[in-house]
Image: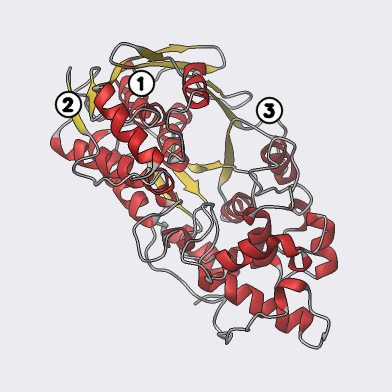
Amino acid sequence: MSINEKQYNFLRTEYSEFVFESYSYEKTPAGLNIQFHFHVDNKFHFYPKTKIDFQEMKFSKEVKQGELDNLAFNIGLIELISYWKCICPARILIKPHKLDENQIVFWKKLWFHGLGEFFYINSIDTDIENFVTITSFGEKLSSFHFTTELEKTLVPVGGGKDSPVTMELVSSSGQKIIPLIINPRGATINTVKQFGLSDRNFVLINREIDAKLLELNSLGFLNGHTPFSAMLAFYTLLVSRFLSVSDIALSNESSANESTVLGTAINHQYSKSYEFESDFRNYYKSYISEDFNYFSFLRPLSELQIAALFSQMVKYHSVFRSCNVGSKEDIWCGHCSKCLFAYIILSPFLSPAYLSEIFGGNFYDDEKMEIYFKELTGETKVKPFECVGTVDEVNMAVSLAIEKFYGKNDNLPYLLRNYKKNKISKNVLKSWNNEHFLLSKYEKTLKDVCGIK
């Protein structure tokens, strides 16, 4: 038994229940402020806060209390998992509102699979039936209807290569883009500016983590990855309701469906997967509102296809950043798997010299990247716990790059010297995954730009 699993078992013996005590919100001239109250056995109390600022975007002042109760409560249900995981009590009590059996099934599935990496990294052996029980109280909430503006689309912006592709192509279909950014950084703001909007023309969400959680982490309580994209999904519903917008276009691709630990269900990107997207759509239609249309615009495509499209969008090349390590400084750190993956996936389409300008070096020639190269190309059982493409996509990208830029070069960069090139499919950039929720107008736009009939 690992040290962390012993800690997990000890904490579950020492602490009995995690309580979602309450939520509150306040309308402001800028938008909405929300606060949650969670606690563990009335000993450790957490009060996370979120501020939603619509800046120069017009938003409704007439959203009803029942609608806000529903949206805020459900956000609380996804926010709580970040706090539950530091102690992992065996019981969760939901005090504000009653959940029915189907809702409990949804939340247990989301929490369990969303914490798959957390359980794996901490060597915690549990299952979906036994990791937690849920008891809820209070009045059951009702779903609602609202009138929507069909010509607008809300697009969350993360700062990487995917959201610019979504914004540009959805815009080309005639939609007005409303960007949404959670906890802005250089890359996200610069992406919006390069799209052609000012730094006041997006919806701004600031999430504030309670300091008690950080204190417990520093004291040796459990820590790890939580499903950020699921949290984002519930916030997009709230923002969309204030904007009276139906369409919410995410930028998750088909590659997000692949497990991180090959041969298991453990997926760092679970809440970016088609499975979660489908579950989430069914959930909000049943319990929140049928008038939302949450979908991933890039779902039919692979990372390689998206990279091909992004390679042509030159104005974003100097501002996009996929590196988590360097995100606060708005740089490519040049030493992590995310940096290497971004480099690899673009390498069939942009010259080595130009890539060096973007990333600050030729990552194919960096010996320190070798372990990440092996993980990404499938030489190891476990992929990096990051948002990266499939093993097949990475190998295809490397093989295409060798063929295009290194084919006649006897002096290959370090990582490519012993690499066995894969057979390249002629239709690699023409694939189309039919598991998606795109409306016909969006599907036509995406197929046209990819040359798919």
Residue beneath the point at 62% across and 32% down: 202
Three-letter residue code for mark 3: Arg
The numbered mark at residue 185 is none
Examine the rendering and report whether any part of residue 312 can be seen: no
Left or right, 388 with respect to 5, comes to right
Real-space CA distance between mark 1 and mark 2, rounded to the nearest whole angstrom: 23 Å
Left or right, 221 with respect to 426, comes to left
Left or right, 440 with respect to 183, comes to left
Quarter holding residue 102:
top left
Real-space CA distance between mark 1 and mark 3, rounded to the nearest whole angstrom: 25 Å
Label 1 vs label 2, nearer the camera: 2
Residue beneath the point at 36% across and 66% down: 263
The numbered mark at residue 200 is 3
SS for callout 1: helix
Quarter of the image that includes the N terminus: top left
Q: Earlier in the sequence, mark 1 or mark 3?
A: 1
Residue beneath the point at 14% across and 36% down: 101
- Percent across and percent down for residue 308 are 65, 68
Three-letter residue code for mark 2: Thr
